[in-house]
Image (cartoon, helix red, strand yellow):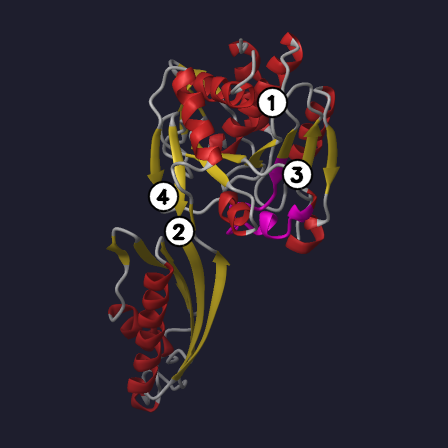
Amino acid sequence: MIKKERLYSRFIELCSIDSESTRERLMADRLTELLTELGCTVMEDDAAEKVGGTAGNLVARLAGTGPGDPLFFSCHIDRVVPGVGVRPRIEGAYIVSDGTTVLGADDAAGLAAVLEGLSVLREHAIPHPSIEIVLTVAEELALLGASHLDTSHLIARCGFVLDAGGPIGEIVIHAPEQVKIHAVFHGRSAHAGFAPEQGISAIQIAAQAISRMQLLRIDAETTANIGSIHAEGPTNIVAERCGLKAEARSLDPAKLRAQVVGMTEAMESAARDFGGSVEIQVEPCYRAYRLSEDAEPAQRAARAARKIGVPARFKATGGGSDANVFNDRGFPAVVLSCGYEKVHTTEERIPLEQLDLLAEWVVALITDGTAG
């Protein structure tokens, strides 16, 4: 029932709209226009001022025309850098960018699929339950937009977040908790040529701390990474200040706590050993979630996948999504794989076949248990 040409055209249009995190105004306006044309009422919240951006989260509602409990679909409308001036094109069996930017399939694939699903409902007058569509800003900034979303207005208690790589049919039911760590190491300045022994290098303290940490893949459930280390100054002055940014994630909250303790202890012990000091700030980003395979959104997603002829596979992931926020607030939601590849790189692409299946999956999810 989907129209592939319309689906591809919308996807390419959405990818072409500049929408880096906190600069989503053009995307929000276009999506509001498209959703209104499809019969939805659209509300924009005040997240823009809270995240320092140009647009807020959008919540659209389509009144039900048939039986069934309300459903919600969620996508994010921002993309990572470099995401301005995207020039998408069909190249063989894929849609790609020109190689100078990301494509933005994360998350334009989800957006295009939801819009196509609503278009199919409208064209064929298919009975459907009430549908809520939650479109968030600044998702790529540790779910910042969703964290400011007022979910008390949502009615649906069965949701689907279209926001994962991997083939259509994969359903994420377990995702990690994440924290960010910001540290500032303090040493003592001195002339690096005349009296270096009088100085304490903050850079050296940071380097020692990092060398004592367990990083990258810790175990099957836990990861940690140093994102940046920063100090400015001339080479002839021993650096008295050095900043560090890091993160840790785990599917197991207890393992995450242990990892954070290990990283902070490494920083504190290095500072003591060199006679310096360190200020550490641990910032929680989002909490882990785990749904049973028998949970309603998981079962509905699996049935819909089989309906369109693809195998359903439940999985855990190492990445967070807005589903972490929804589940934490009592709105059961699974993440659906969208078929895109090489995400967050200038080689990002999506197979046309996977985009087709994603749109068909949305239609099957909405019509599950109905005559449509």
Residue 176: numbered disc: 2
Please report whichever mark, 1 or 4, sits nearer to the chain's N-terminal start: 1
Number of residues whose C-alpha sits closer than 10 Å to that of mark 1, classed few (under 14), some (14–19) or many (20 or more): many
Task: Give left or right: position of 271 versus 85.
Answer: left
Q: Quadrant of residue 235?
A: bottom left
Q: Is residue 150 magenta?
A: yes
Where 151 sits versus 214, above or below? above
The residue that appears at 62% across and 12% down in the rendered structure is: 126
Give yes or no for contact between labels 1 and 4 (Cβ–Cβ under 8 Å). Answer: no
Please report whichever mark, 2 or 1, sits nearer to the chain's N-terminal start: 1
Tell me residue 121's x, y (percent). Answer: 62, 15
Pointer 1 residue? 115
Pointer 4 residue? 317
Instruction: Give the Cα distance between marks 2 and 1.
Output: 29 Å
Please report whichever mark, 4 or 3, sits nearer to the chain's N-terminal start: 3
Pointer 3 residue? 155
The residue that appears at 68% across and 38% down in the rendered structure is: 58
Q: Is residue 200 visible?
A: yes
Amino acid carrying label 1: it is: Leu
Instruction: Give the Cα distance between marks 1 and 4.
Output: 26 Å
Where 263 sits versus 313, above or below? below
Q: Is residue 321 magenta?
A: no
Instruction: Give the Cα distance between marks 4 and 3.
Output: 27 Å
Q: Quadrant of residue 291?
A: top left
